[in-house]
Image: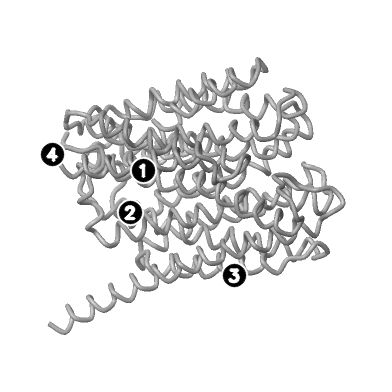
Amino acid sequence: MNNYLEDAKVQKDRWMILLAVGLFTFMSTLDGSIVNIALPTMIKEMHIPANQAEWIVSIYLMVVCSLLLLFGKIGDSYGKIKVFRIGTFIFVFGSFLCGLNLGLPFLLGARSLQALGASMTMSTNNGIITEIFPLSDRGKALGFIGSFVSLGSIAGPGIGGILLAHLGWSYIFWINVPIGLLTILLGKFVLPKDFSMDRMKIDYQGFLLFTLFIFSFFAGIFIGQEIGFGKPVILGLFALALVSIAAFIRLERKLPNPLLSLRLFKNMDFSVSLFTAFLIFVVMFFFNVIAPFYLQNARGLAPNTAGYILMVFPILQVFVAPIAGGVSDKIGPELLTLLGLLLMSAGQLGFVITQEGTPLWIFMIFIALMGIGNGMFQAPNNTIVMSTVEKQDLGIAGGLNALARNFGMVSGISLATTALFHRMSQVYGKHTTTYIDHRPDVFMSGMHYTFGIALVLCAAALLLTGWRMWKIQRLRKQSFLK
C-alpha cells in the first residue's frame, strides 16, 4: 500500500481518525488558555504573587513554541502517527501531575511536561489529516481541525469559569485525563501505522538556537513588564534573542536538511496564510486576556457568568468552521478567508467602542462577529497552508502552522498585557500591572487602547489577504487570456 488514500480500512475509519486527532488537538490547545481565568483562585490557594502566577500560562506556550519545529521534523523522519501517539500519553500524564497542588516549581515542571506532549500532537495533527483525507474532503476535515484548534484556544476562559464555579482549580487540568484516555483508546483502534518516513538527520543545533530565542525573547517581555524594559538584564535578554534568531537563520540556510526549510516561504500562498494565521491568533489572545478582566472586574460578573458569555465565541466557531471548510472545497478558500477577516475586524471595532455601561447583549454581538469570522477564516486558511507544500514537507508545514498559532498566542498574551498596563500606568499616573479597584476608567482606557492595536493587526491581515486574492485573480485572468 503506497499511501493512506489507497487503504480501504483507513478511508472507512477516516472520520473516526479525525475525531481522535481533533479531540487531542482541542485539549492541547485548551490548556494554553484555560488557566487564565483560574489565576486569581490559584494565587490565593498557592500563596504566590500575580507576576509569578503568569508563568503558569506562559511556560506552557513557550515550551510548546520551542518544540513544534523539532517534532514536526521528527514526525517527517520517523512517523507522524508514532509521534502523535507518544505525545498523547505524555500530555495526559502531565495533566494529572498539574492538578496536584505541590507548589509552584512542581506545577511549572508539570506544565512543561504537559507542553512536551502537546507539542508532539500539535506538530503532527494537520499532517496526519492532510495525508489521510482525499482532496474532495480535505478542506472539510481541516475545517474540523480548525474548529478544535480555535475552540480550544478561545474556550478556555469560558470552560474554566464553569469548572471553577463547581470544582477546585485542579479540575481544569484533571478534566483532560478521562477525555484523554478515551481518545487514546479510540486512537488505538483507528489510527493506522506510519508508512511515510524519510529517516533524515535531525537538526538539533538549530533546535537549541530556536529554543534559546523563544525563551530569551518572551522572558524579556514578561519580566520587563514587572521591572521595566530599560533594565540591563532585559536588554541583555533581548540581545540574546536577536543573536540566537540570527544564528538560527544563518545555520538553516547552510544545512542540506534544516529544522526549518526556508524555501517553503518562497511560496506566496503559504507565507501569507501563515503570517495572517499568526496575526489572528495574536488578536484572539488580546480578546482572551482583556475580556475576562472587562466582564469580571469592570462589570462585576461572577466567573461562571463571564464564562457563559465568553462561550458565544467558541460555540459559533465550532458550527461555522466545518461549514466554511466544506464550502472552501467547492469554491476555493480565498474569498472565505477575506470575509472572515472582515467580520473579525468589525468585532474588534465593536470592542474599541464598548463602554463600562454597554448592554451585555451588544457586547455579545461583537463576540459573535469574532466567532463567526474566525470560523470562516481558520478552515480555508488551514487548507491553503497544508495544500501548498509537497508531501515530504507536510510534517514541517504542520509544525509551522502550529508554531504560528502558538507563537501568536504567547505573543498575544505578552503584547496585550504590555499594551494594557502601559496605557493604564499612563492614565493612573504611576506604574501598575493589575486592575485597580474603584478606578474602572483606568482599565477602560487601557482596554480601548489595546483593542485599537488588535484592530490594526486585523486590518493588516485583511489587507494581506485581499492583496493575495487580487494577485491570484490577476494571474488566473492572464492565464485565461493566453
Of label 3 and label 2, which has the lower sequence position?
3
Of label 4 and label 3, which has the lower sequence position?
4
Tell me the amino acid under the disc marked 4. Pro
Tell me the amino acid under the disc marked 1. Asn
Residue 362 placement (x, y as % from top left): 74, 66
Element under label 1? Answer: helix
Element under label 3? Answer: helix
Residue 343 lies, with reference to residue 404, above or below; the image says below
Are dots 4 and 3 in contact, CB under 8 Å?
no
| CA separation in Å, label 2 and label 4 | 23 Å
Residue 114 lies, with reference to residue 136, above or below; the image says above
Residue 367 placement (x, y as % from top left): 65, 59
| CA separation in Å, label 4 and label 3 | 45 Å
| CA separation in Å, label 1 and label 3 | 29 Å
Residue in view at x 44 percent, y 42 percent: 238
Q: Nearer the viewer, mark 2 or mark 4?
A: 4
The disc placed on residue 81 is none
Q: Residues within 10 Å of mark 1 (few under 14, many from 20)?
A: many
Horizontal relation, residue 120 to residue 106: left or right? left
Residue in view at x 48 percent, y 70 percent: 339
